[in-house]
Image (cartoon, helix red, strand yellow):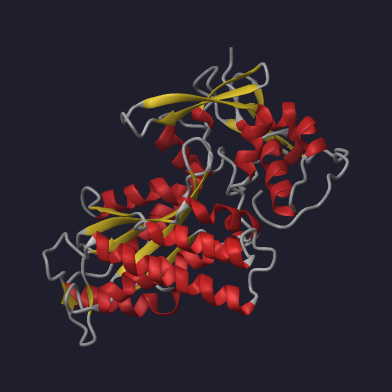
Amino acid sequence: MDRPTLAGILRTHGSTYRRSHALSPTQARAWRAIVDCRTAALGGVRERCANCGAERHVWRSCRNRHCPQCQTRAKEAWRAARLREVLPVPYAHWVFTLPHALNPLAIRHPRWLYGALFDSAAATLLELAANPRWLGAVPGFSLVLHTWSQDLRVHLHVHALITCGGLDAEGRWRIPARGTHFLFPIQAASKVFRGKFLARLDAAHRSGELPDDPQGAPGAWQDRRRALLVHDWVVYAKPPPGGPAQVLDYLARYTHRVALSNDRLLGCEVGQVRLRARDNATGGKRTVSLPTDTFIGRFLRHVLPAGFKRLRHYGLLACGHKRARLAAARAALQTPAPQAAVIEAAEDFLARVSGEDPRCCPHCRVGRWQTVEIVMARRYDPPAPAPRCRDGPR
């Protein structure tokens, strides 16, 4: 039996789910893109082998950032562009995680909360890096937002890849005071991160920036704030392996990852979806079984608000002055400027990652595919609209 795909599950169970659940506009767009991806709904071309006459259809991809079929090519293109920005210094991988007590607020106000998470994590790294006790310089780092756990529950965190060193006010490259691979104490970062986020949360509460906060009533607000202060917030750090190319490979695992890849789906039968998940207790794998409606609902919670950027750059990599600061960093490190980026053709990329030339007919293995017809996107009658809801994950 063929293994299920996310698109197949949405096609099979979509009408039942949408009769009883409201989708936001962004969720509806992601749903339609995933279902239509690489099908006649998006159109494509009909190709014929010039040698044996075999024919095939090649359908267009949706390129939606939540589609598990469309991220490999985007990830490779991103990696090729970023390779020119990696400096020949050690890097560190940090993870900043929000407590689960904030999950109800994330469901109601995702754009605000995700933005506050980015700002608080970035401000924490920049503040600690500016302290001469640890570094006394401006590092370069990127943050990537993830909102999910392995079983698709809400688990809000950002991954950071940061240079172990930075550019000081005199234009000199400085290494961390405690050694080339040690930036800051995790305990200090946890306290600074918590303080900065809570300051943002308190200010938003006072200004009325968070209407309809599920815990906005005075008693519930105080209860949540006490819960957020009980424990240290989870901050994690470790060095990624290897040199510049390996550092980018490491970060690329996170930049274009979606909440669920098709290879994690094990089965869909009798109203249950089975998926493979990491077992944090043993370090191995486990099987999670979810009712179909629960599975779809959990996946849709991780559809980001429209236009929200889940990958952001700071310090030496901040967009306003990235070129000048990277040039200054390379001068301080006595590193030559990188070579011009080479843009790889789509066919060459597919041949490299799959080991087979997609331009060659697999039947005769001699002829090349030639386009004989452009197939327009098929028209379809859209389903009856479901009740509208707020723009954000549910």
Most extreme residue toward the bottom is 170
Task: State how many labels appear.
Answer: 0
Location of residue 327 by image quarter: bottom left
Q: In this orientation, which residue lies closer to the viewer: 357 or 335?
A: 335
Q: Position of residue 300 (x, y in %)?
A: 64, 43
Residue 290, image x and y in percent?
A: 59, 27
Residue drawn at x 65%, y 63% is: 213
Looking at the image, residue 77 sits to the left or right of residue 381; the answer is left
Q: Where in the figure is residue 148, as x and y percent of width and height?
A: 50, 45
Q: Residue at x 32, y 48 (%)?
A: 250
Is residue 109 in sight in this rendering?
A: yes
Position of residue 230 measured from the top left corner of the image (x, y, whole percent): 39, 58
The residue positioned 74% from the left and 52% from the top of the image is: 24
Residue 291 relative to residue 318: left or right:
right
Q: Nearer the viewer, residue 48 or 315?
A: 315
145 or 331, nearer to the observer = 145
The one of 68 and 212 positioned closer to us in this rendering: 212
**Dividing the picture into quarters, in which one does residue 170 lie?**
bottom left
Is 220 drawn above or below residue 286 in the view shown? below
Residue 339 visible within the image:
no
**Which quadrant would the N terminus be assigned to in this image?**
top right
Drawn side of residue 368 relative to residue 389, left or right: left
